[in-house]
Image (tube, rainbow, N blue to C red):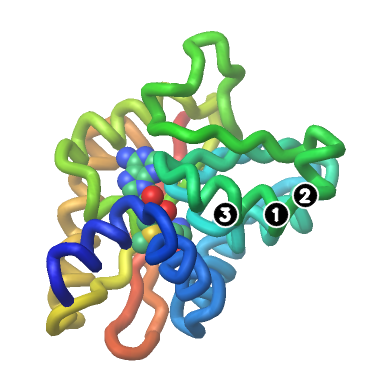
């Protein structure tokens, strides 16, 4: 995959970005790994949920369905993705059950109430300082809250080993950040599996 396409996956922009958003929303492996991740979160009816790098809003839709009396925040630094997520979840936005924010974690106000669940799907590979990212997420979790991050290697020649290695790196970071019950789950997918690393704030 060329560098310009990789940058579109990291931050979709313009017309190409709109097409990339369509891929995120329709490619079988994307849809399956998002649904799988949301399932692993074991959402409760009134949970407050944050997705970082929500893309076109597929996982947000699943969260809104499961936490049907809860509230959801979708964060993405791509305005093109936020527009697609809004269109896909317009009713929830109008009912104020879904808030969409263009930006990164640092753009959420300090006054933001803590979240019961915080997660991301295929975003962690774009985060340069993963240790700081995990620590920031943990800070924003309510006691008992759960953090989950999913990764499926893509582009170039993805391998199963890349998924396993990322799982080990993330397990160490979540443990270092003070989370308990840290574990890695694996979903067999084409071309290579996705892993999700989860942990709980005590
Ligand atoms: C590969 S896409 C994945 C989208 C969606 N989660 C999915 O699995 O289909 C990565 C998304 O994360 C967003 N993103 C990357 N780094 C981010 C950051 N630091 N903060 C917020 N969004 C970010 C990108 O704009 C893009 O929409």
Is 13 drawn above or below residue 25 in the view shown? above
Q: Nearer the viewer, mark 3 or mark 2?
A: 2
Name the residue at 73% across, 47% down.
Answer: 44
Q: How many C-alpha atoms fall within 10 Å of the one at disc 2: few (<14), some, or many (≥20)?
A: few
Label of residue 41 in the image = 3
* Mark 1 to mark 3 CA distance (whole Å): 24 Å
For label 1, the residue is: 87
Name the residue at 31% across, 61% down.
Answer: 9
Residue 3 falls in which quadrant of the image?
A: bottom left
* Mark 1 to mark 2 CA distance (whole Å): 5 Å
- Across and down, in percent, residue 4 comes to 19, 63
Seen from the viewer's position, the closer of residues 25 and 166 is 25
For label 2, the residue is: 90
Q: Nearer the viewer, mark 1 or mark 3?
A: 1
Seen from the viewer's position, the closer of residues 191 and 194 is 191
Residue extending farthest front: 15
Residue extending farthest bottom: 190
**Mark earlier in primary sequence (3, 2):** 3
Q: Mark yes or no: residue 88 visible.
A: yes
Name the residue at 70% across, 54% down.
Answer: 87
Tag 3's secondary structure? Answer: loop
Q: Mark yes or no: residue 150 visible.
A: no
Q: In the rendered picture of this protein, how many numbered marks are placed on residues?
A: 3
Tag 2's secondary structure? Answer: helix
Q: Check contact, mark 1 vs mark 2: CB within 8 A.
A: yes
């Amino acid at each position: 995959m060329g560098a310009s396409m990789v940058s579109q996956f990291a931050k979709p922009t313009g017309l190409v970005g709109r097409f990339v958003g369509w891929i995120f929303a329709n490619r079988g492996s994307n849809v399956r790994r998002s649904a799988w991740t949301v399932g692993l979160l074991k959402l409760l009816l009134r949970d407050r949920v944050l997705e970082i790098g929500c893309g076109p809003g597929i996982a947000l839709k699943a969260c809104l369905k499961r936490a049907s009396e809860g509230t959801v925040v979708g964060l993405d630094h791509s305005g093109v993705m936020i527009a697609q997520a809004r269109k896909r979840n317009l009713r929830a936005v109008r009912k104020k059950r879904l808030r969409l924010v263009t930006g990164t974690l640092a753009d959420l106000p300090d006054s933001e109430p803590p979240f019961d669940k915080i997660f991301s799907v295929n975003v962690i590979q774009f985060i340069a300082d993963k240790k700081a990212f995990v620590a920031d997420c943990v800070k924003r979790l309510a006691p008992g809250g759960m953090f989950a991050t999913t990764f499926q290697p893509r582009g170039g020649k993805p391998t199963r080993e890349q998924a396993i290695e990322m799982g080990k790196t993330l397990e160490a970071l979540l443990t270092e950040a003070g989370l308990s019950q840290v574990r890695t789950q694996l979903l067999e997918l084409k071309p290579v599996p996705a892993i999700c690393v989860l942990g709980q704030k005590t």
